[in-house]
Image (tube, rainbow, N blue to C red):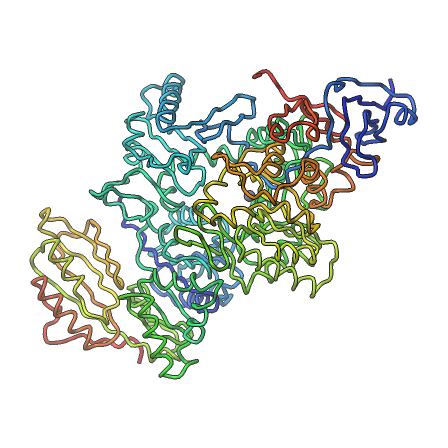
Amino acid sequence: MSSAPIPVTVIGGYLGAGKTTLVNRLLAGATGERIAVLVNDFGSVSIDASLIASSDGDTIRLANGCVCCSLAGGFVEAMTRVAEFDPRPDRLVVEASGVADPAAVAQYAHLPGFGLDAVVVLADAETVRRRADDALVGAHVRRQLAGADLVVLNKADLVDPATLERVCDWARTQADGVPIVAAVEAVVPLALLLGTAPRSATREAPRAEAHVDHATVTITGRTAVMRRALDDALAALPDGVVRVKGFVELTDPDGTRVLVQRVGARMRIVPFDRDPDSPPVQLVVIGLSGPAVAAAGRTLADALGATLAEPGIERHHQEHP
Amino acid sequence: MTDIRIFAARRVVTMNPSNPSATHVAVRDGRVLGAGTLDEVRGWGPSELDDTFRDHVLVPGMIDVHSHVFEGLSGSFPYHGRFGRHAADGRFMPGVATLDELLADLRRVDAEMTAAADDPHAPPEPLVSLGFDPVHLPGVRLDRHHLDTVSTTRPIFVFHASMHVATVNSAMLARHGIDRHTVATGVVRDADGEPTGELHELPAIALVASALAPIMRAASADSTILDFGRLALRAGLTSVGELGGQLLQRPAAVDTWSRLVNDPSFPVRVTIHNLGVPPGGDGDHDAAAAALVALRDRHSTDKLRFPGVKFVIDGSIQGWTAMMNWPGYYTGTDHGQLLTVPEQFVDWVRPYHRASIPVHVHCNGTATIDLWLDTVEQLVREDPWLDHRHTIQHSQLTTEAQLRRAKNLGMCVNIFANHLWYWGDVHYEQTVGPERANRLEPCGTAERLGVPYSLHSDASVTPLGPLHLMWCAVNRLTPSGRVLGEHEKITPYQALWAVTQGSAYQLHLDHLMGSIECGKYADFTVLDDDPLGVDPMALRDIGVWGTVLGGVARPVDRTDG
Ligand SMILES: [Zn+2]
C-alpha cells in the first residue's frame, strides 16, 4: 500500500456521557488535520452554519477540511466511502452508539486502508456508577469501560472532588491499566485524545479547558534497537503516560522501520516506510503531568539507548494557559 | 363464459368459525362469494364448476408475516445446512450431516465452477457456501486446512448459518493479505499465531470483501425477489412478509418491488415492514414515519403492502446475545446485547404510533420484551389507540405474566415456532435450560390467555413453510426425540388458525384474508391432505399442490418430484 493507514479513534460511552459534545468540538475545533467523523445520529451534529462548506444527505463537509458522515448504512459502507475521499482524511473518528461495545466497533478499524489508533470511552462522572449497576444496561456500561484504551470521566464539575476521586478509583477497577482523564464539557486536549496537536495557533477560547493539563517529551536515538527491547520498554512505562507515538528502526530484521503507537495498554507496532535519513529512534511521550512524563521519557530513552530530544531542557509543554 | 367460478374440493376448511367446513367455494372478481355445498353457492348466478381440486383440501391462504427476501438467495449459492431444503426451482438441496459430506460437496461445486469458467487463466471466482451450522456437528471445528483439501487455488468462503462467523481457506486468506500480522481480533488464530480461517463478526468477515460482494450483488438482484416469491408459493403461502425492509434507505427499491410483485405472474402477496432507521442517519423518526405513511398511501396495492415498521432491539438466544432477565443463561457466557438505548426507545417509536403505523419489535430475550411492553404502555397512555396491534416479534421466551400484559395492552405476538425443532435441544441443554426451554415458543399460554398470535419462519434463518411451523407448534419435537413442553402444545386447528387468521389479524388485514369467507380474497392453500384430519406427526409432510391467489390457480412446479 502506497499511503499509510488512516488512524481510527473510536469514541464510546453511554447515552449522556458527552460523545456528541466531543464530536461537535472535534469538527469545529480541528485546524490543520482533516478529520473524518462517522456518527450514529446525524441530527445531533450541530455545527455553526458559517463553517459548513457543503452538505448533502449523509455527508457534511466543513471549510476546515473535516467531514462528517452518517453511519446509517453501516460501518463497512461508511468506511468504504471515507477511504475514497479526496483529499484523503488524516484520521477517522467513529462515534459508537450508546449501547455499542466500542472495542467491538474498533474491529472495523482493521479494514484495508485503516488502522486502529485507540478506543476512547467517555463516562458521566455523576451517573456512571449507577448505570453500571443497572440490571438492563449495566453490563453494557462495564463492557464499554473494559474495552477502553483511554477513559474520559466527563462532567467532572458536577461532582465534588472527593466523589470524583472515588469514581476515578472505581473506573480504574473497570478499565484496568488504562489512563483516566477528568474533563468538563468533554474538553480533552487533542494530544491526549488523538495523539495530535493543532498545527495552527488558532484555538478555541480556553474556558473550562484549563484544568486538563498534559505534557509531552520527545526522545531521539541514533542506533537501531531490538524488537524485544522496544516491546519491554513500552510495556514498562509508568502510569501517567497516555500515549507514545513515533518511529523506530529495528535490528531484527535489520533496518525494518516501524510505526509505534501505544495508547493506554494498547500497543501497535507496524512496518512503515519513512525517510531513511531520519533518526532511528524518534518517539513522543504524552501524559498528564510534566514530571511524570519527563520521568517516563528518561526511562524509555535509557532503555532504547536514546536521549531526550533537547537534553537539559525538558519540554514541559502546557497546552492550555 | 361466466365470471363466477366454483371450486369443488374434497374439503374446504374455512377457518370461519360460523361456517367451518364446506365442499365448494364460489369466486368472482378475485374474491369469495361464499363457501358451502354446491347447492348453497350456486345461487350466485351462472357459474363454471372447476373440479381440479376434487381430491384436494382447501384451507385459507397461509400467511408468514416474518421472513426476509434474503431467503430468495438460497438457491443462488451452494447450501450446506444440516436439514435438507428446496431451492426456488424445486431442486432439493439435501444439506450435509458430516464434515466429509460438506467437503465432498464443496469439491463437487469447485469442479463445476472450474468447468464453467470462461477464462481458465483468470483468477478463480470465490466459492461461497451458505447455511453451514456447526451447532449440529459437535466436536468438529471447521478450519482452513479442511477447506484447503478442497482447493488451494480457488478462494472458499463458508458462511455459517448464524451469519456471525465464516470459515475460509488459505487461498481466500492470501487473496486478501490476511496473515499472522493481521490485527483484527475476529481473525481466529492457532497456537502458532496463524489464522485458522475462522472469521468472527462482520468487521473480520468484511476483510474478505471478494466473498461478500457476490452475496450483496445477488441480494439486490430481481432474481432474488422472484425466487422469494417462488419459494413462498412452494411453501403454500399466499402472503409473505419481508420484516426488515430497507426502502427508507433505498427508495429506488420501491419501484423494483412494485414492478415485480404487482406483475400478475408474481405468485404471492407481499407485505414489507421497513426498518425504523431514518434515512441519512439524522435520527429524525418523525420524518421517517411520514415517509412510511407516504409509501403506504402511494404504493400499496392488493399485491404489495407496507403495513408497519420494524425495530430490532436485541440479539438471539442461540448466540447468547438476547437480553435475558435474571437469572440469565443456563450455561455459557451472557453476551446480551441491547440494540437501542432503553431511555431513548419510546422516543424512537412514538412518531410511528402517532402516525397509526403498527410497530413490530424483534425481542428475543425476556428483558427486551419487558422494555417493549413498558414502551407500549407509555405510548397508549400518551396517545390512546385501542387497535394498534403492536407486535412482539419472535417472542420466544415470553413469560405468562408478559403475555398477560401483552393481552391487556392490545398487542400481538408472532412466535418463532421453528426454533423448537432447529434449536430446541440447544436451548434445553445449553442456553436457557429445561424449564424455560419447555415454555419456549409459548403457543399454549398465548392460546389460554387469548393473546392474538401467529407463527413465523424468519426465513432464511429457517426455511419458509407454514406446515412445518404448524408441525412444530403441535408436536414440539426436537431432533433428539425430546418433547419440549407438553403443556405448550396447541391443536392442529389452533395452529392453522395461527398461520391464517392469526397472521391476517396481526397485519390488520383480517377483513381481507385469513378465512374462506364471503367478501375476502379468494386466496387458498391447496393441500394433498387435510391438516385437521391427518396424524399430527404427518403435518409437515402434507404435499402442497399450490395455491389459489385472487381466484387464480397457481400450481407448484413439481417437475422435481
Ligand atoms: Zn427476522
- Ligand 1 lies in quarter: top right
Query: Is B36 placed above or below B422 here?
Result: above
Residue placed at 57% from the left, 53% from the top?
Answer: B278
Q: Position of residue B396 (x, y in %)?
A: 56, 47
Task: Look at the image and tell me in which quarter the C terminus of chain B lies.
Answer: top right
Residue placed at 31% from the left, 35% from the top?
Answer: B143
Task: Look at the image and tell me in which quarter the N terminus of chain B lies.
Answer: top right
**Which of the 4 image quadrants contains residue A165?**
bottom left
**Which of the 4 image quadrants contains residue B354?**
bottom right
- Indicate left or right for A76 with B473 as reference: left
- Indicate left or right for B520 with B332 as reference: right
Q: Where is residue B225 in the image (x, y as percent from the top left)?
A: 58, 32
Query: Is A187 placed above or below B517 here?
Result: below
Q: Where is residue A18 in the image (x, y as percent from the top left)?
A: 44, 69
- Residue placed most toward the observer, A171 or A261: A171
Query: Is A195 placed above or below A7 here?
Result: below
Question: How many marks are shown on the rendered structure?
Answer: 0
**Which of the 4 image quadrants contains residue A245?**
bottom left
Q: Position of residue B416 (x, y in %)?
A: 57, 42
- Residue placed most toward the observer, B381 or B438: B438
Residue placed at 14% from the left, 62% from the top?
Answer: A233
Query: Is B492 placed above or below B557 here?
Result: below
- Residue placed most toward the observer, A24 or B219: B219
Residue placed at 27% from the left, 50% from the top?
Answer: A4
